[in-house]
Image: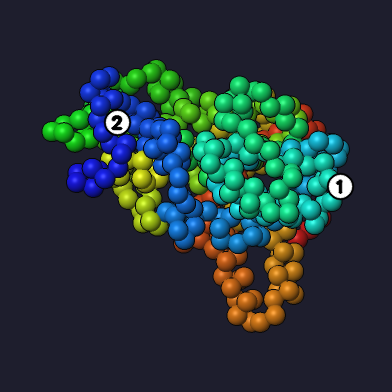
Amino acid sequence: MEENQTTPLLKIILDRIGARGPLTFADYMAACLYEPGLGYYTSPGRKVGAEGDFYTSSNVHEVFGRLIGREISRMWEVMGHPAGFQIVEVGAGNGRLASDIVGAIAELAPTLYAGLTYRFIEAEPSLADAQRLMLGEHAAKGAWSTPADLAAGNLAITGCILSNELIDALPTHLVEMTADGLREVYVTVRDGELAEALDVPSTPELQAYLARIGIRLVEGQRAEINLAAGDWLAGVARSLVSGFVMTIDYGYPAAELYSSHRLNGTLLCYHRHTIEENPYIRPGAQDITSHVDFTSLGLRGAELGLQEVWFGEQYRFLMGAGMMEELLALEAKATTEPARIRHRLALKKLLLPDGGMGDTFKVLIQSRGVENPRLLCMRDWGKSF
């Protein structure tokens, strides 16, 4: 564990275990990602892009944000063109996606743009300056609030609450089915190093979660149970007066996510664009993620008064939102064939499976207070309603 000694967070975690006993994996992951000043997402430094540890769709091409901007403009239309429309992005990073969305709306829906507020919800306060800079000429549209504001329902939002690769990074419990029943993975210390131990679940909610979605793990199977995702959605529902929730992330419906062929679950780490399977090295210096259970998000949303409007693969969403129109516009603007090829390759990565992002990423859209919303993603590709 020599590499562990280079991270300031390790001693804090070791001391915490010494004082309190073993931590649930969810508590350990929360420390690794969100410990004030020392967690992966709460410490300075670039996380996304060539200088970071991974790419998101918004880093691949600006068209990703432009198409979301098209769909949000459609949301504003089906809501009856409300004044004071807000886009609320949770976990916006450096603001690249926000800049592309707002730029598209300024061009395509100037009346919406005139009354638009783009609100950032971010765990790392130092990102506000980077986000303001990224918005550039649109900086006056920016506003900033805390995750606590959203969770408490302090934001009376009419508009769209957006997250892109947020739910996968919420702290998750880790469980394993044994001959004696469901057990939870705890993080302990053995010979001065971080180690795992199995024990009875820390809360009956873990077994209830699996029962609710009709999942029975096979003996020896590990899985992630993300209780925090449901809690996060409850905060979103408290803050949304009218409008939409758009969740973009990698994951599956429950039957596929918890299939017995995934004996080891989906937990992964990312460090300098390399996948790492060991979450116990570099605490605070590498990302830790798990795939999203979209079935549970849908069920929890229904309990909270959110209607499921649309769910599908990213490529279907992008095509419905107008990918071909955007591609034709790019081709018309490109002055050289190499430029056209660069555009095509980037868009291919967004759309295609097997190494691309087209089917790995899913889009879930939920609504409140909107009658029969007919969104762009719901149309046949290239056709109007």
The residue tagged with tag 2: helix, strand or loop?
helix
Residue type indicated by callout 1: Thr
Quadrant of res 335: bottom right
Q: Measure the alpha-carbon separation of dots 2 and 1.
A: 51 Å
**Where residue 111 appears, x then y in whole percent?**
86, 47
Label drawn at residue 111: 1
* Left/right of residue 338 with respect to residue 254 in the rendered view: right
* Left/right of residue 129 with respect to residue 159 in the rendered view: left
* Left/right of residue 307 with respect to residue 297 in the rendered view: right
Query: Is residue 314 visible from the viewing direction of this image?
Result: yes
The residue labelled by disc 2 is 12
- How many residues crowd mark 1 within 10 Å: few (<14), some (14–19), many (20+)? some
**Where residue 177 appears, x then y in whole percent?**
30, 30
Task: Look at the picture and state if 53 lies above or below 114.
Answer: below
Q: Nearer the viewer, residue 325 or 34?
A: 34
The residue tagged with tag 1: helix, strand or loop?
helix
Residue type indicated by callout 2: Ile
